[in-house]
Amino acid sequence: MSSLSSRLEAIRAKMGDEQVDGFLVTSMTNWRYVSGFTGDAGCLLVTHDKAFLLTDSRYVEQAEKQCPGFSVKKTTHDEDVLKDVVRKEGVKRLAFEKRHTSYEEWEKLRDRLSDVELKGITGWVENLRMVKTPEEIELIARAQEIADDAFALLFQSIRKGAREEDLALELEFTMRKMGAESVSFPIIVVSGERSSLPHGTPTGKTLADGDFVTFDFGATYQGYHSDETRTFVIGHLDKKHEEVYGIVLEAQEAALRAVKPGVLARDVDLAGRKVIEDAGYGEYFGHGIGHGVGLEIHEGPSVSVKSETVLEPGMVITIEPGIYIPGFGGVRVEELVVVTDDGMRVLTQSPKELTVIKA
Ligand code: GLY
Ligand code: MN
Ligand code: MN
């Protein structure tokens, strides 16, 4: 059975549990996962025995090629194709993705399908997406490899006087040249005091003696993302750099050791967070320690103090503790790992010991 047909099967099992006879998929990422369609306009309608892909004239030919198991219906301005299909297939109870339906869209749906009972559901496809197939893991590993290789090349440009923006641009260009479809998200390069901004954007600031410089970046490959962070010191290393970097690395190692099947994602966060708190820097680490990565840069499972998800083999998550001290700077080190039958495998290849780049 192909992974696409097993995805449809899993969705139909959910439809059975919830006693609905149709499921409307309105998230682009979710419809890609379920059907293979990479266009950015349309929706899927899944019934117990059929699957439809509704899209406009720009994408009909593409959809027919990409989604052989789906009946492609062309939408137009003057016809209500969804309503017609819903009627023809006898759908009386229709599940829809409430996280991916605006209030306005829901109002329109309610008016158009006035004789259909609408049932808002959450997470049917996202929960399937959390556990990756070996093929998906290969694509994520390839995206990560491109990012690591590009970063190794960029390394020679990281020196005192280099501009944050130029480094970001060069890294993006190099990843694209090496086969990335795009960046996973706008690249973060922050240096000096600006490195305390966990998601700061690169500026014209130049790297200076005594700066921390943090790079957070990733590539996409066939729709799948990678995610990695490295922090270096430029020129002069002082005791505080060493202390803060050492604590972040120790926190990361503690969290990595906790990653295995059967463990609550929350406990992975706590294992890393404890190291930072015990060292007296707890107030400088405000975000969760990680997140799932796949067709989206941030997806399930969340690896944070509140996450109730139990880790399973095939989940791909980041482990990315950080300490961010306003007025001083910050450090984050982020690895991408896959949960395996007996623990985890790190996909990130770049070295992560404290590196001082001679000014
Ligand atoms: N830059 C996004 C992240 O690391 O989560
Ligand atoms: Mn990142
Ligand atoms: Mn991340």
Image (spheres, helix red, strand yellow):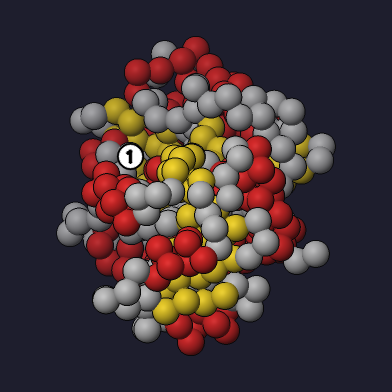
* SS category of the residue bearing label 1: loop
Q: Identify whether 237 is placed above or below 295.
A: above
Toward the bottom, the furthest residue is: 61
Q: Position of residue 335 (x, y in %)?
A: 56, 45
| Left or right placement of residue 156 versus residue 178 in this view | left
Q: Kindly identify the residue that appears in the image at 62 percent across and 45 percent down.
A: 15
Q: Identify whether 143 is placed above or below 205.
A: below
Q: Position of residue 233 (x, y in %)?
A: 39, 45
Which quarter of the image is occupied by the N terminus?
Answer: bottom right
Tally the marks. 1
Q: Kindly identify the residue that appears in the image at 32 percent across and 78 percent down.
A: 76
Task: Rate crowding at label 1 as few (under 14), some (14 to 19) or many (20 or more) other CA atoms within 10 Å.
Answer: many
Using the image as rendered, state which of residue 43 and residue 169 is in the foreground: 43
Q: Can residue 181 be spotted in the picture?
A: no
| Residue 222 in which image quadrant | bottom right
Using the image as rendered, state which of residue 170 and residue 111 is in the foreground: 111
Mark 1, residue position:
198
Q: Position of residue 270 (x, y in %)?
A: 55, 20
**Which amino acid is tagged 1?**
Pro
Q: Position of residue 210 (x, y in %)?
A: 30, 42
